[in-house]
Image (cartoon, rainbow, N blue to C red):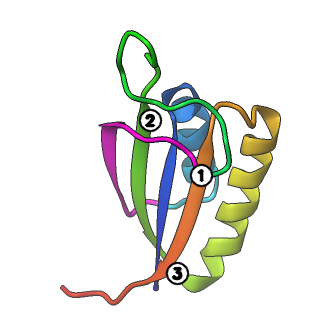
């Protein structure tokens, strides 16, 4: 099992939801308002007057074979609007209960 941490500009929320639905990825936890700035450039997302945009973050839990299709779909979405910001990180996960 894998955990995929995804952080993205709120503007991508509908598209990310559609990707999860299309790929039938059900197990996730969402943090609706997260702040941050990317390591590869782009503008900070702080929710302030100077930097008003905000991020949303997800921790997705899925089977190993579901990871690449999910990452491929997220890469395509990020390529459509790279300045918006979208990053995903894959970690090993063990089911606890």
Q: Residue at x 49, y 29 (%)?
A: 10
Q: Position of residue 70 (x, y in %)?
A: 65, 62
Q: Residue at x 30, y 44 (%)?
A: 31
Please tell me which residue lies in front, 27 or 60. 60
Mark 3 residue element:
loop
Please tell me which residue lies in front, 32 or 26. 32
Mark 2 residue element:
strand
Q: Position of residue 73 (x, y in %)?
A: 73, 54
Label for residue 63?
Answer: 3
Q: Is residue 16 left or right of residue 83?
A: left
Residue 11 lies in quadrant = top right
Q: Quick check: 7 above or below 83?
A: below
Residue 3 lies in quadrant = bottom left
Magenta segment: 26-38
Q: Position of residue 47 (x, y in %)?
A: 36, 21
Q: Is residue 31 left or right of residue 8?
A: left
How many callouts does the rendering have? 3
For mark 1, what is the residue? 39
Mark 1 residue element:
loop
Please tell me which residue lies in front, 52 or 19. 52
Q: CA distance from mark 1 to mark 3?
A: 28 Å
Q: Residue at x 43, y 16 (%)?
A: 52
Mark 1 packing: few (<14 Cα in 10 Å), some, or many (20+)?
few
Q: Quick check: 60 above or below 83?
A: below
Dot 2 or dot 1, earlier in sequence: 1
Q: Residue at x 44, y 35 (%)?
A: 55
For mark 2, what is the residue? 55
Whether residue 64 is in magenta: the answer is no
Dot 1 or dot 3, earlier in sequence: 1
Q: Residue furthest left?
A: 97
Q: CA distance from mark 2 to mark 3?
A: 25 Å
């Amino acid at each position: 099992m894998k955990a995929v941490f995804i952080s993205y500009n709120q503007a991508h929320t509908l598209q990310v939801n559609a990707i999860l639905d299309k790929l039938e990825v059900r197990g996730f936890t969402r943090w609706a308002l997260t702040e941050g700035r990317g390591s590869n450039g782009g503008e900070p997302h702080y929710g302030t007057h100077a930097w008003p945009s905000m991020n949303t973050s997800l921790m997705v839990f899925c089977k190993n074979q579901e990871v690449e299709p999910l990452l491929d779909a997220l890469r395509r979405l990020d390529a459509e609007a790279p300045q918006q910001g979208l990053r995903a990180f894959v970690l090993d996960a063990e089911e606890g209960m």
